[in-house]
Image (cartoon, rainbow, N blue to C red):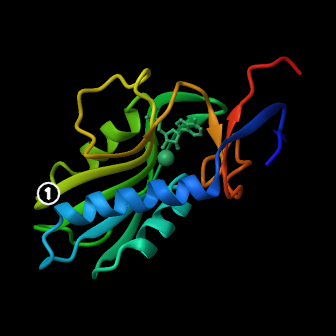
Amino acid sequence: MSTIKLHDLNFTPFISEKELSEIVSSLVHKVSLDLDPDEVPIFIGILNGSFLFAADFIRKYTQNCEVSFVKLSSYKGTTSTEVVNELIGINEDITGRTIVILEDIIDTGSTLHKIYDCFKNKQVKQLKIATLFFKPDVYKKELPIDYIGKSIEDKFIVGYGLDYNGLGRNLPAVYQLTTEAT
Ligand code: IMP
Ligand code: MG
């Protein structure tokens, strides 16, 4: 893997495909241990960023499950806007069900706050949050995060579903914004 350029910014290799696969496998393992084998969970991916993570997570999950997606949006460029919009909501009847949210990355926590908001009146049995990445230095909320794939420093990343102004989602590995002047 070598340095790549997206729009005006340069990014260097950060997390390989192999490490990503290992992180996802360990998340699946931890989530599976907690789930009641007699019930069918609904995994809900948060679009757009989690589409690859959700696809890989679900492929590694071996029991029966249902899958859905919610579309939220908060980021502009390389900073979180704090205003989170729900672009596509949940249509299924999720009353009494176990929901596991699959999020790509938790940064300030504004999106997570919005997720808790969307589900608070739905009378689900339980709501669990699994995030591939977490930036502990920027997280501003007290809301619980049940499963964390990898905690990372506060630097902007792209790839494996994550974008910089629309580009980079298709990269199979994760790249980090370079700090060097170009
Ligand atoms: P939060 O609302 O500030 O926690 O930001 C969460 C959302 O912003 C994530 O679901 C991502 O879609 C996006 N995001 C946060 N950090 C990054 C990053 O480093 N690269 C790309 N997108 C990010
Ligand atoms: Mg996201």
Residue 90 visible:
no
| Other residues around mark 1 within 10 Å, as few (<14) / some (14–19) / many (≥20) | few
**Where residue 130 sits: x, y (%)?**
34, 51
Q: Residue at x 63, y 57 (%)?
A: 17
- Of residues 161 and 174, the one nearer the viewer is 174
Please say if 162 is above or below 77: below
**Where residue 99 sits: x, y (%)?**
24, 62
92 on left or right of 34? right
Please say if 26 is above or below 86: below
Q: Residue at x 29, y 50 (%)?
A: 129
64 on left or right of 68? left
Name, please, the residue furthest toward the top: 181
Is the C terminus in the top left, top right, bottom left or bottom right quadrant? top right
Q: Residue at x 80, y 31 (%)?
A: 9
Q: Which corner quadrant of the image does residue 82 belong to?
A: top left
- Of residues 22 and 7, the one nearer the viewer is 22
**Where residue 133 sits: x, y (%)?**
46, 42
Q: Check disc 1 and report its element: helix, strand or loop.
A: strand
- Residue tagged 1: 126
Task: Name the kind of residue labelled 1 in the image.
Answer: Gln
